[in-house]
Amino acid sequence: MTDGPEPISADALRALQEELGELRAERARVAATIRDEDPVGDRADEADELQRAGDVARLEQRIDEIEGRIREASVAGPPSTDVVGVGSTVTVRFADGTESTVRLGELAEAPDLGLVTADSPLGRALLGHRAGDTVTYRTPEGTTTAAVVSLGPAR
């Protein structure tokens, strides 16, 4: 992404908060199954216990990532209307002359057909650019270009 804290759209923030709640609940469920006392049982029981401990560690890592992203977004402020960043609404003109207005987002939101994720080829190419810039990016059909026509506030 860019060098500083990235803003986040309200929809993406809600999605992260929802995922965070689900992960915390799952972590609590899995952690409750881990025994504190000395393990009793066969090797399969021990392997199962190790698997659950690994699951808790994986869940905690993702929880930490989400909490960090939410903290970062809270200090980032609103998306810039001068430079393309996560949360920006961008009108681009593609090499074939067609124009489209898209929102650069962090998370793919199924019902939002106007969303381009920041880690997609077009999203990565647009980050940090301004109106008037032309970006080059790779598609399955090969390399192509798009011109940044305008930037607007987040939707």
Image (tube, helix red, strand yellow):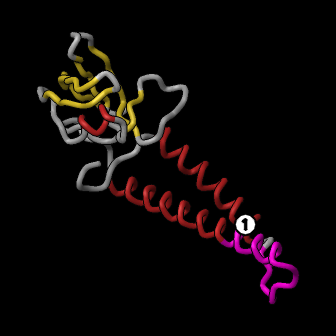
- The answer to whether 53 is drawn above or below residue 75 in the figure is below
Label 1: how many Cα within 10 Å (few below 14, some 14–19, many 20+) = few
Regarding mark 1 in the picture, which secondary structure is present there?
A: helix
Q: Residue at x 68, y 64 (%)?
A: 27
Measured as percent of width and height from the top left, residue 117 is found at 39, 36
State which quadrant residue 127 falls in: top left
Q: What residue is at 83 percent from the left and 74 percent from the top?
A: 45
Which residues, given as a range, are shown in magenta? 34-53
Identity, as a three-letter code, of the amino acid under mark 1? Ala
Figure check: 42 above or below 129: below
Q: Which residue: 31% across, 27% down?
A: 139
- In this figure, which residue is indicated by the disc labeled 1? 28
Question: Is 27 inside the magenta-drawn segment?
Answer: no
User: Of 109 and 88, which appears nearest the observer?
Assistant: 109
Quarter of the image with the C terminus in it: top left
Foreground residue, 152 or 110? 110
Image coordinates of residue 132 in percent, x first then y, are: 11, 26
